[in-house]
Image: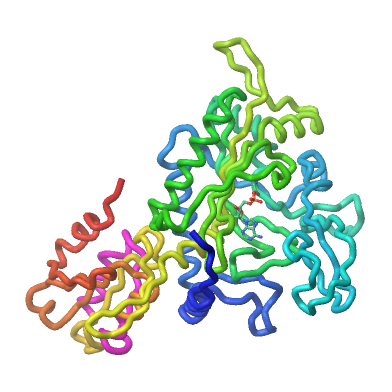
Amino acid sequence: MEDHVDAELFDKVVTLCKVRGFVFATAEIYGGFRSTYDYGPLGVLMLRNVKQAWWRSMVQLRDDVVGLDAAILSPPAVWEASGHLSNFTDPMVDCRSCKERWRADSIGDTCPNCGSHDLTEARAFNLMFKTTAGPVDDEGHVAYLRPETAQGMFTNFANVVRTSRKKPPFGIAQIGKAFRNEITPGNFIFRTREFEVMELEYFVPPADAPTWFEYWLEQRFGWHTDLGIPESHLRKRVHETDELSHYSARTADIEFRYPWGWGELEGVANRSDFDLLAHSRASGEALEYFDQAAGERYTPYVIEPALGATRSMMAFLLAAYAEDEVGGERRTVLRLDWRLAPFTVAVLPLSKKPELEATSQEVLGLLQPSYMCDYDVTQSIGKRYRRQDEIGTPWCVTVDFDTLEDRAVTVRDRDTTEQVRVPIDALLTELVSRTAGP
Ligand code: GAP
């Protein structure tokens, strides 16, 4: 399929995110801050749902994966051993005319800002954020903000094996913030300097690594499609040898068709025994597994699926955005899977009349323990439906004057706009059946 730039879709999604409260520019009142973003009332809900969907599939539904939440700050020794201090770099060039800096591999020989060809030689720029831990600002107190969560899982390998009694094949999963001083961040939340990543380090006997690599690539591809990204928007791409990260023996990306063309969504890497061996050598602690049955000690290989939570949220938003016509009226609708939508249900009293208030609050109270709900009494019911469509709410529950007589409400479906009457007593059961899944 040919790449085509759909700038209109990109702009519409970015605007919707800002206007409806998904994503705001950080420190916007001061003019923003270098491609850094805050997640607003709807964005925080959706991002939590993306992370929850990942955690559910990677940890909750498996008996071979445990979780971890390691520190963001860590000492230089970790990054020296992991190879990040010497290798986690991008090639950077300066434009001598306008003084802009660029990633050399993304611009060719022309400055995208001023068109000059007067560029410096490329030099390696390390992407890690450096800081100091404690009140003394000297080399002895240097710490780094992690650029990936993975290292916390390698440095805790022996702790986890000892305490969880897991044996290969098994995995450690982690979700958390990562920081990279990207030379050229951009495309909204696609590439930022602070982002959230969801990573699994899956430890396997070395001979089984190729099989597990294929297994995880398939599993992860299926996760995106199961949550609503059409297969036509996804493809797999194996890395050429010269693009592999310093730790990787083999990597395949799951790419998404962004409005500007195909690009990385998730990476699946075979990190071999690179990290465990490196930390073992540097720390002096054995990071091995002793297979009692075979009487063998070995260093496991690691298969690693790694996906940016924030980048994943952006892909879901782009794939879900649609405009259609309902009853002769144009509408914008986010066709998000119900598991990802910020609100699962909106409770809407037909009017502001006080007699509807008590029953509407009763319905809200019935649903809130099970679902994230919105409650909206402003504007006409038609406008409120449009608003809920635009933020992706799968179901609206309307309380009207008949409700006071028959104790039934109207449940409206976002995608079909179909409405059915449901007794309040049966409302939870109705929603449970609509959200029942595998
Ligand atoms: N531990 C493996 C690792 O860090 P990576 O491909 O560099 O691999 C993993 O990053 C994922 O994190 C990417 O596939 C992407 O989804 C996301 N990601 C990487 N850099 C990012 C950035 N600057 N902003 C947002 N997401 C990013």
For the C terminus, the quadrant is top left
Ligand 1: quadrant of the figure: bottom right
Q: Is residue 367 magenta?
A: yes
Res 40 seen here = no
Which residue is painted at 74% across and 29% down in the image?
277
All told, the count of numbered labels is 0
Which residue is painted at 26% across and 72% down in the image?
396
Q: Residue furthest left?
A: 405
Q: Which colouring convention does the figure follow?
A: rainbow
129, above or below 273, in the image: below
Give x and y (percent) for residue 303: 59, 36
Query: Toward the viewer: 162 or 108?
Result: 108
Query: Toward the viewer: 319 or 88?
Result: 319
Image check: 342 left or right of 325? right
Res 366 seen here = yes
Give x and y (percent) for residue 330: 32, 83
Give x and y (percent) for residue 238: 59, 44
Say which quarter of the image contains residue 349. bottom left
Q: Is residue 416 magenta?
A: no
Give x and y (percent) for residue 259: 53, 68
423, above or below 225, in the image: below
Image check: 61 left or right of 265? left
Image check: 96 left or right of 18? right
Which residue is painted at 17% across and 73% down in the image?
410
Q: Which residues are magenta?
A: 358-384
Q: Residue furthest front?
A: 2
Which residue is painted at 82% across and 61% down in the image?
92
91, above or below 373, in the image: above
Query: Toward the viewer: 125 or 60?
Result: 125
